[in-house]
Image (cartoon, coloured by chain):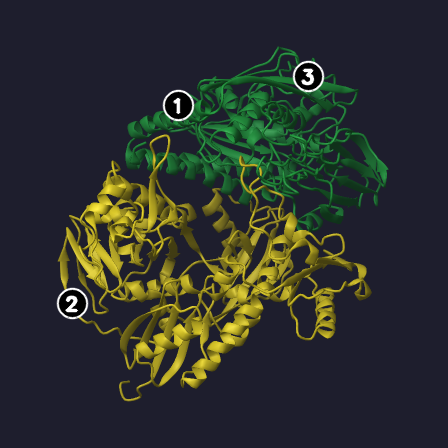
Chain colours: A green, B yellow
Amino acid sequence: MNVELQVIGSSLRAVAEEMGAVLIRSAFSANIKERRDCSTAIFDESGRMIAQAEHIPVHLGAMPDAVAAAMALGLSKGQVCILNDPYTGGTHLPDVTLVSRTSLGYAVSRAHHADVGGMEPASLPAFSRELYQEGLIIPPTLLTEEVEQLFVANARNPDERRGDLRAQISAHRLAERRIDELCARRGRERIAAAMDELYAYSERMVRAAIARLPDGTWSAEDVVEAVEGELTIRATIQIAGDEIYIDFAGTDAQDSYNLNCPMSVTRSACYFVVRCLTEPDLPASGGAFAPVTVTAPEGCLVHALSPAAVVAGNTETSSRIVDVLFRAIGDRAQGQGTMNNVALGNDHFTYYETIGGGQGACADADGPSGVHVAMSNTLITPVEALELSYPMRVERWHLRTGSGGAGRHRGGDGVVRELRVLEDCRLSVLAERRAHGPGGENGGEDGAPGRTLVNGEEQPAKVTKQLRAGDVVRIETPGGGGFG
Amino acid sequence: MQSTRVAILGVDVGGTFTDAVLLDGGRVRTAKVPTAPRQEESVLAAARAVGAENVVRFAHGTTIATNALLERRGARTAFVANDGFEHLLHLRRQTRAHLYRLCDEHPPPLVPLERCHGVRGRLGPDGELEPLDLSTLPDIGDADAVAVCLLFSFRDASHERAVVAELRRRHPGVHVVASHEVAPEFREYERASTTAADAYLAPVAARYLRALADAAREAGLPEPLVMLSSGGVASVDEAAAHPATILVSGPAGGVVGAGLVARRAGFEHAIAFDMGGTSTDVCLLPGGRASRVAGRAVGGLPIRLPTVDLHTVGAGGGSLVTRDAGGAIRVGPESAGAHPGPACYGAGGGATVTDANLLLGRLPAELPGGLVLDRAAAERALCDIDPEAVIEVVNAEMLRALRVVSVERGHDPRDFALVAFGGAGPLHACALAEELDIEAVLVPEAAGVLSALGLVAGDERRDRVVSYVRPLAEVGELSADGEADLRYHGQSFELTVPLQRDLAAAFHRAHEERYGHAEPEREIELVAVRTADVTPGPDISLQVTDCYKVEGPALLELAGATCWVPDGWHGETNDDGTLVLRR
């Protein structure tokens, strides 16, 4: 890789990172400003991802589909496309994606908005059975003032939505300026050529890393805990030369509730596993995923068809896809395997957080405690920030000591988080690993399953219910599995 | 002024050398001695080497706190939080250490789990929710220091004060620190982390600083003033009480020195570029003074205290050069260190940036001190790697850092002069200036001891912060000088605006400039007010040893540094002995 290329690569990454900083620093909802549930990236003219700010894995792997969908609109420079439809470039409805045309390619931001309408506050219903119940569906649409009004009018907390959306737009304006500056300084043609080469470089690096892995074919399966029964995910991973093929034949049909993944989310989870197995330190571009082919039968849980409900697929099923693939490879134990989504809200507020747990142990190290383990890496909202802004009190927030699985290397511990609500409101919890603990590997023990309690009473993995002022929600997150 | 013969002494302790600058009746003298394991001995040795007499002011920069933190040589420390929140330091903000290396661990907290305790009692945003019950405060065992961080103490310190008083009563010999004394700002994890570092470092820092003060007294020197991370100074007692405030002490001195050199050369705005052997610090100096940030991470731990806005890159002259599987040249983060050093030192070291500079003719054949550089060893080590490419790669890293502190913060680097110092700074500065369209590069005569010069000439500055977190409209009169951290109600990150009459309008303007939009209809929240008492530093005149002009390409050997002047650059020294290079 020549030097000018390295310089341009760092410049493009810096643009993506600065976009992320502007979005986080000027946003209004705790979920973006404190928890950083957002991602940003720069794409080239042909819609290939060239540079990204490393935020949330599930966002990043699914972005190329969003850009492809936006490109169909034929954006001109400065125009911004908004979308959230999981079946045309989105992931689940709260993830609102903007794609804007720069003077050379596209800038993309994806941010999880704390409410996009639908049947429950905070738009994470446990019992949705079709996409229409999960909120406002926005197919790729040119973002105008009127569209902004339409979007804001459909959310429960319009003022916060407007603020967050404008923070997202600010990030795009910045990207347009920065790309202009880069082109003026180094020449548009050279930047374009560098983008091609950056893409090819990532592809070369990842192909070389895959070629170093032993060839072979492995399969594994595991279940997700649906509202009605359990659903099986089965995956076969084949490493052949410098390519990886992942197929989900044998996976159950799509869920009648919302554990479904559109294909973009499934690909995202597979790309995450490939990154972990090959080049974890490589500055990512879309080229890293070119050697990976993902297939799944249409209409199955991980290749759901419109209008299947998807809200938990993005967070929970995606986590399980990662678990199944790691289990097939067999080089590490399973992590908590859930994001422990907690959504609360009424007419005055909507609040959303996800809670970390135990990481599975690796062949050579213990699993860390109290962290997000796979497709998320969001921060926890500080207790003081939460209590200053929302009618809630945090009663406890500590490690769930002893919940990690024993083994030569221990799984990480989960955490305990107790929230007392100070107003009547609705609660939704979308969680997993309530019935089965995360699996140990190579003889290591399983981690402890998680628990969700309301006023001391144990709840199922997926729950939506009314709370009264003073009620206490206690989440005990799963421990990671042990290894050896 | 010559008749009074009073002198000002600055001593900066670095990893390898301890530098002294003496300002004596207007004349500047410098000295360098090796750093000894007992830092106070090197400080005194450096003072003797520079011939310190009749000293009225003695300023000191030290790495004692930083090293104790990085090497984990602090006190056995306990942590007290609210009951149910004992593990704050271990939970952090729940992000993992590496996005794709799943079992990577963060640096371990300074307090192990078994020394983390809870006490019953709770404050909320609007007052007491549960009274403090001191009978639930557990035994802290054999800890030598205790950090106390209770929720909402930045608003109401009464519970923390009571816990601290009780701990001091029970354990008179133990150092106890409360979070509201150190970093009275919201976000409990960052405040707790700062407080834990402060407690952890206090016994080590106090021992050193008291030993230094004693040694200084015996040597007839005044008590030292200690350089703070913020660029201000504090007494020995103040620094010993809160050593988290001196974690960036040394680099802060360099930044102050760079600002001084730039102002005196007639440049209003400057960027300090300090490239050493293993790392490089850059800092923006708009108006000739360092911009400050509200906190930074040190050794992976958040420290929420005012700090000169340094951006550090893990690459310098001694960084090792490798080629990865995809064919890209990588520089650092590993370094050849002082031993074995770069390949050209002939002691079996690997290829480094210094070797590439040697092959390009940018280093003399023999270093001051007599080390003859081994060209053949440098060639062998670099093998098929083009030395030009090595320099371009390391410069790309430096450029990124320079852009972070300038362009990304809304400043055009063309308005700034680049002040190059540290052993390798003046070697790389002109090429970087060209990339950023910077017109002037300043190389101070004291490029090798600029931190110590900053200590001598720096202001005496004491910072204060008052936390508000309430609507600006409800806040009464504010002091006239200082800065306010403001945000729209509902945001979590503040913009810092100088205190002025129409603060609201100034904030809307700042938001518009920074983020491209303002929202005048939204309520503005005042988060904190930062003020500083400043006693300006002394007027100094630097007497020049020799004046010269230079025309590139040329190689200049300076005291403790080498300067490469590329083709197309020329310059001459000014009245301070600073080399001013232009294209």
Q: Residue at x 78, y 23 (%)?
A: A227
Disc 1 and disc 3: Cα gap in Å?
32 Å
Disc 1 and disc 2: Cα gap in Å?
55 Å
B22 lies above or below B434: below
Where is mark 1, residue-wise?
A45
Q: Does the residue at mark 1 contact the one at mark 2 (Cβ under 8 Å)?
A: no
Mark 1 or 2, which is nearer the eye?
2
Amino acid under label 1?
A: Glu
Amino acid under label 2?
A: Cys
Describe residue B7's horizontal placement relative to residue A254 as left or right: left
Where is mark 3, residue-wise?
A308
Q: Quadrant of residue B162?
A: bottom right
Q: Quadrant of residue B266?
A: bottom left
Q: Is the same chain shared between marks 1 and 2?
A: no
Q: Residue A241 placed where, x, y %?
A: 45, 18
Res. B339 mark: none
Q: Pointer 2: residues within 10 angstroms few (<14), some, or many (20+)? A: few
Tell me the subunit letter for badge 2. Answer: B
Where is mark 2, residue-wise?
B547
Amino acid under label 3?
A: Ala
Q: Is residue B551 visible?
A: yes
Q: Pointer 3: residues within 10 angstroms few (<14), some, or many (20+)? A: many
Tell me the subunit letter for badge 1. Answer: A
Disc 2 and disc 3: Cα gap in Å?
79 Å
Q: Pointer 1: residues within 10 angstroms few (<14), some, or many (20+)? A: some
